[in-house]
Structure formats: structure tokens, C-alpha cells
Image (cartoon, grey):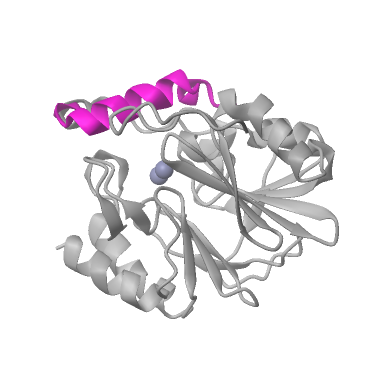
Amino acid sequence: MSATADPGPTAGPATLQLRRISEGVHRLSSVYTNWYVVEDGGRLTVLDAGFPRDWPAFCAALGRLGHTAADVDAVLITHHHVDHAGNAERLRAQGARVLAHAAEIPYLTGARGRPSSVSVLPHLRHPWYAFYIARNVVKGVLRTPAIARLDELADAEVVDVPGSPKVIHAPGHTAGSCALLLEDASMLFTGDALVTIDLDNGAPGPRVIGGPHTDDAEQALESLTELAATRARTILPGHGEPWTEGVEKAVRIARQSGR
Ligand SMILES: [Zn+2]
Ligand SMILES: [Zn+2]
């Protein structure tokens, strides 16, 4: 992706950015939302699926990595929220399997309607959040396509896809929220179960997401115990920057900020 100036803290970086995390692990991000590509043996697993309007930039990013969308064997969705699923159906149509926890699948297929967004309205008094939501809409988040077919992820399963991620069920943000662990690399992809930015004001630091987007904030705090038990060195969240000081320290900070 060409480097363009960040339009400012209230707008968020609009262009999809590709960043190398380590050998075979790359981050894609726009509007403070991250998804990841894991490369293993020439094949790819995509963890979460970004915004619909980032599809052309995503294909270009894959090209820079020497791949095409046809090289994606699997898309693992951490949870059903639309900012994490934007390109999953397109990848499925090109031959990828799409997987999520059973509790998330009815929302992703459209069998169950997503909860009303009316509860978001009072939260728009936070200017940073209001701009963030507006940028999500510009990125096509309200047009995230339903996914025609998904397979289930089970807690503690090591998924037979490139990178062999292990599923850590971490409910709270949503009932079927999962983190994904690359054990050998000591990397934990936490989705929205643990993030490193405050989506109300852009402040950095580990935290659980509260407010209108989280089903059960108390349960989200309890699930931090499961994340800490992985003892992963690096956290790669759905929102915010990578954290490299170990999951235990991140969980300690998140518990303090969540009380
Ligand atoms: Zn979410
Ligand atoms: Zn999110």
C-alpha cells in the first residue's frame, strides 16, 4: 500500500496498511481495525476479514506477498461483528473455508438478525467514537455480505489450516468470541476479547471493550483468565497496536481499566 498521511486522530488511517509482524505473519489495518494473514507452506489462513471496501487493497497486499486470494485456504472469524467479517464471503467464493464458533454462525449467515444498533446512539457523544463509526460506515461496514457457509470452531481445537491456530474460547464481547493462538510463535490473536486501544477516545493500552458493542463485560473480564493461561508473548488484537510484553501483563492492565 502506498504510504498516505494519516488524516488525523479523529479520522483514523483510511488506507489499508500492510505490516510484517514476523516471518509468515502480516497485519492488515484500516480505521483502527486489524486482520491478519498467516502464511504456512505457501498457503494462507486469514484471521478476521476486514471491511468490504478494502477488498481491492487486500488483493493488492496479497500480491505484494506473492499471493492471490486463491491461495487462501481458510478464514477464521473471531466473532460476528461486521468490522471483522467484511471479505469472508468473497474469500469463500474463491474456495476458502470460513470458520467461526457455533454461537457466532447464525449472525454471520444472516439466519439471525444482528442486535439493534440503537444502543450505539448515546455513545456517539464521544467525538472520537463518532468519527470512528462514521469511517466504519464509509468502509462499507453496513454492507458486510452474509456468509453462505461456515464450519464450526471448537474450544481448544487445533485447526487443520495453514499455521495450525489453536482456538481459545473467550466469551463476553460476544458469546462465541474466540482468540486464536499460534503456539510455536507465542502469538495470540485476540479479536475483540482483548484490545489495545480505547475506542471511545483512541487512548492506547490493553483493555476489554465495554459499551454498546459488548454483550457481557463482566464475562469478558472473566475470559481474560483463559487468555492469560496461554502465556503468549505477543498479542495481536482486532483493534490497536501489537503488544509484545506478554499476555499476563496485558491482562493485569486490562482488568484494572475494566473495573
Ligand atoms: Zn466486536
Ligand atoms: Zn471490532
Q: In which quarter of the image is residue 28?
A: top right
Query: Is the C terminus in the top left, top right, bottom left or bottom right quadrant?
Result: bottom left
Instruction: Judge left or right: residue 44 versus residue 236.
Output: right
Position of 104 relative to 145 (above/below): below
Q: Is residue 148 visible?
A: no
**Percent coordinates x, y for residue 199 in the rendering:** 28, 42
How many numbered circles does the render carry?
0
**Percent coordinates x, y for residue 99 in the rendering:** 65, 50
**Percent coordinates x, y for residue 252 in the rendering:** 26, 74
Q: Quadrant of residue 162?
A: bottom right
What residue is drawn where x is 25% and y is 56%?
Answer: 217
Viewer-proximal residue among 213 and 235: 235
Q: Can residue 114 be seen in this view?
A: yes
128 magenta-colored = yes
Q: In which quarter of the image is residue 222?
A: bottom left
Query: Is the N terminus in the top left, top right, bottom left or bottom right quadrant?
Result: top right
What residue is drawn where x is 56% and y is 38%?
Answer: 17
**Percent coordinates x, y for residue 253 in the rendering:** 25, 69
What residue is drawn where x is 23% and y is 32%?
Answer: 128
Instruction: Judge left or right: residue 188 versus residue 56.
Output: left
Position of 164 relative to 117 (above/below): below
165 magenta-colored = no
Main secondary structure found in the magenta portion: helix
Instruction: Judge left or right: residue 22 versus residue 123.
Output: right
Position of 19 relative to 149 (above/below): below
Q: Give the range drawn in magenta.
A: 124-145
Viewer-proximal residue among 105 and 158: 158
Q: Where is ligand 1, by quadrant?
A: top left
Instruction: Judge left or right: residue 205 versus residue 89.
Output: left
